[in-house]
Image (cartoon, rainbow, N blue to C red):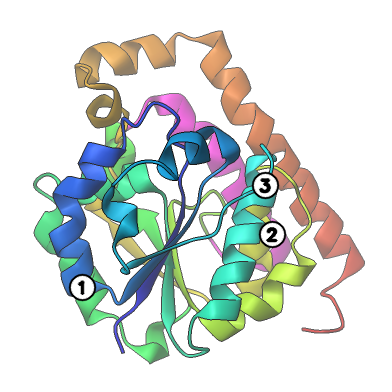
Amino acid sequence: MKPALAFPYHDPDRSMLPRLQAVLPDLKEHFEHAFLSPPPSTLEWLGHDPSIFKDDFFTVFPSEEEALVGNRLAYLYRRTAETAFSSQPIHLCFPDRLTFALSGPHRESFLADVDSLSAEELPIIFQRSEYAWATHPKGYRSLEGIVTVVGMNLFGRELDYAWCHMVVPAGQLGRIIPFVKNPDISMVAEIIYYLRDEIHTRDVDRLAWDDPYIFNRDAGELKHEREHSLAETQKRLAYVLPMIETLTRLAGNGRHPGF
């Protein structure tokens, strides 16, 4: 059975649409299906546009309100788990990272990762390699790394709690999502908490920094701007601090009886 994709789709200005159209042949060749959930700001044009989403490769789960991203992801993952086959591997990812990986020099390695995964390797986090981290502004790794250090101290494993891409069987995803409560992006750390004892990892170069591609900016110039931006530091702390609080709280409470 081919794997499936699940990703949020916030695209009010349609800037992501041509990027997805460009990689659709690869997606249809290597994945069985794609599940996505757009908020109302994207649905405004999506329902009237003869776009690729009319293709039965896609299943669209409309979000009825402009909810926080964590709530949107939880809704998407719950509906995906209810719809897919229980044993089907679901790639939880983001469209910017997905299209970046398939639009440049990392395409072949990305597709090899997709095609080579076995059931015994699941669930798995694709983590940023040393090369991938070196492409990011330095504050990204130093701040997100705090969560990794806290998780290591609490649970004895070095994991990327602010992950960009992971794969989990639909049935397993469906079992953990009811226990994931954070309404913001810090909920991705909760997911890892419930999988931490059995999750595998693989470091990959293709998770290099994708913002220069997304914003069509010079990488060096944009990196310099981000490294000297207080707003960027505040943006990282806005999810790093809730992740730390969440992991320490869950460690204190103990794993839910359902696990």
Tell me the amino acid under the disc marked 3: Glu
Tell me the amino acid under the disc marked 2: Glu
Q: Position of residue 96 (x, y in %)?
A: 34, 41
Identify the mark nearer the N-term, 2 or 1: 1
- Return the mark for residue 64: 3
Above or below for 135 versus 50:
above
Drawn side of residue 14 relative to residue 152, left or right: left
Residue pictured at 66% horizontal, 37% vertical: 66
Contact? badges 1 and 3 (CB < 8 Å): no
- Mark 3: which secondary structure? loop
Above or below for 31 versus 97:
below
Foreground: 173 or 41? Answer: 41
For the residues labelled 2 and 3, the Cα–Cα distance comes to: 24 Å
List the residue tagged with mark 2. Answer: 190
Residue 1: say if magenta: no
Residue 138 at least partly seen = yes
Q: Position of residue 211 (x, y in %)?
A: 32, 29
Quarter residue 14 falls in: top left
Quarter residue 78 falls in: bottom right
Foreground: 28 or 52? Answer: 52
Tell me the amino acid under the disc marked 1: His
Q: Which residues are magenta?
A: 136-158
Foreground: 29 or 145? Answer: 29
Residue pictured at 56% horizontal, 20% vertical: 233
Drawn side of residue 258 relative to residue 196, left or right: right
Mark 2 neighbour class, 10 Å CA radius: few under 14, some 14 to 19, many 20 or more? many
List the residue tagged with mark 1. Answer: 30
Residue pictured at 33% horizontal, 12% vertical: 224
Identify the mark nearer the N-term, 2 or 3: 3
Residue pictured at 30% horizontal, 36% vertical: 209
For the residues labelled 2 and 1, the Cα–Cα distance comes to: 29 Å
